[in-house]
């Protein structure tokens, strides 16, 4: 398959189907084709598979359908590598972290995928979902600024507003060149415009923001809870998180809380 590809794994559940309209819209913005993947123990005729997945003729228009055998996470990752997927869009219904730290199929894909991954909640997205406002969590580090490139490109293509959120809490970015969230300002009316302008200028030096409307917000508290709260306040259509590869219990529980509580799909990129 040539050209950019958006891969959509479907497991046959109604929840998983909620990822398809979002994948189609993101594929339009990225000028990519849609490839639907079903992982099963025994592959059958594609027509029967489409019917079993609940796909109508309109769902398959302009898309391809592939069936693979194997464990879901391994098959999804292999398919993404084989077709050179630029984006994976999937339901986060199976994303869970058990008491022993076992990672569900969705989080296994998230932690190992070589391309950005969009996680869609079990309720899917409202009819006519469109990308009007993107909320991006930022810790002030240059690597996160670089990881936000896919979000900035989508915002540009959609004409969407990009709201950058910094959450001041116990953790602070230690990376060289970081500009962590401010804890307080003596003179807000003077200090905030200067600080926010410098932050956005640094962001624009790394992340392509030409012709993108950008706004900065700062919150205080636990990052997952604050991101979910602000996403609701802003009526965000997409949350963007840059993952730095850490998977300690603390980070795993935070990811799980975000996936379960987010009011909109979550785009996860990799921060180098």
Image: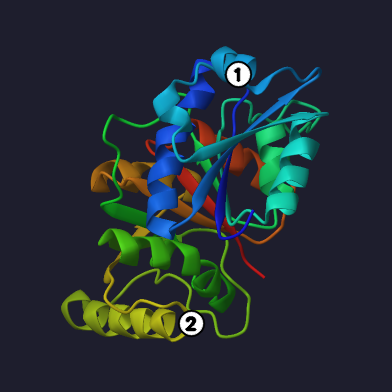
User: Where does residue 125 sit, x and y in percent of width and height?
Assistant: 36, 32
Residue drawn at 44 percent across, 50 percent down: 27
Q: Residue furthest left?
A: 189
Q: Left or right: 49 with respect to 43?
A: left
Circle number at residue 162: none
Viewer-closest of 73 and 48: 48
User: Where does residue 69 sit, x and y in percent of width and height?
Assistant: 81, 27
Q: Nearer the viewer, mark 1 or mark 2?
A: 1
Of the two numbered discs 1 and 2 on the same chain, state the one appearing first in sequence: 1
For numbered disc 2, what is the local secondary structure?
helix
Residue drawn at 29 percent across, 83 percent down: 197
Q: Quadrant of residue 52?
A: top right
Q: Residues within 10 Å of mark 1 (few under 14, many from 20)?
A: few
Please name the residue that numbered disc 1 is placed on.
47
Q: Is residue 43 above or below residue 220?
A: above
Circle number at residue 206: 2
Q: Left or right: 246 with respect to 13?
A: right
Instruction: Give how far apart the Cα atoms at labels 1 and 2 are.
Output: 46 Å
Q: Is residue 188 above or below residue 256?
A: below
Q: Quadrant of residue 25?
A: top left
User: Where does residue 146 sit, x and y in percent of width and height?
Assistant: 54, 74
Residue drawn at 63 percent across, 78 percent down: 175
Viewer-closest of 230 and 266: 266
Q: Is residue 138 above or below residue 95?
A: below
């Amino acid at each position: 398959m040539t050209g950019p590809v958006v891969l959509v794994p479907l497991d046959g559940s109604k929840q998983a189907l909620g990822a398809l309209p979002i994948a189609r819209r993101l594929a339009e913005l990225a000028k990519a084709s849609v490839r639907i993947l079903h992982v099963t123990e025994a592959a059958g005729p594609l027509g029967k598979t489409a019917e079993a997945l609940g796909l109508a003729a309109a769902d398959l228009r302009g898309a391809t359908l592939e069936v693979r055998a194997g464990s879901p996470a391994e098959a999804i990752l292999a398919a993404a590598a084989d077709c050179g997927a630029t984006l994976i869009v999937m339901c986060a219904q199976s994303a869970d972290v058990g008491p022993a730290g076992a990672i569900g199929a969705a989080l296994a894909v998230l932690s190992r995928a070589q391309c950005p991954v969009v996680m869609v909640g079990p309720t899917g997205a409202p009819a006519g979902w469109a990308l009007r406002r993107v909320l991006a969590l930022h810790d002030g580090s240059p690597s996160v600024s670089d990881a936000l490139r896919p979000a900035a490109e989508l915002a540009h293509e959609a004409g969407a507003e990009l709201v950058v959120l910094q959450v001041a809490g116990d953790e602070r970015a230690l990376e060289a060149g970081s500009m962590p969230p401010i804890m307080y300002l003596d003179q807000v009316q003077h200090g905030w415009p200067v600080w926010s302008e410098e932050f956005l200028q640094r962001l624009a030096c790394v992340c392509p923001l030409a012709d993108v409307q950008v706004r900065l917000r700062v919150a205080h508290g636990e990052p997952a809870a604050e991101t979910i709260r602000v996403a609701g306040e802003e009526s965000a259509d997409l949350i963007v998180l840059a993952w730095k590869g850490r998977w300690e219990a603390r980070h795993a529980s935070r990811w799980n809380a975000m996936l379960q509580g987010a009011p909109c799909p979550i785009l996860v990129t990799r921060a180098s």
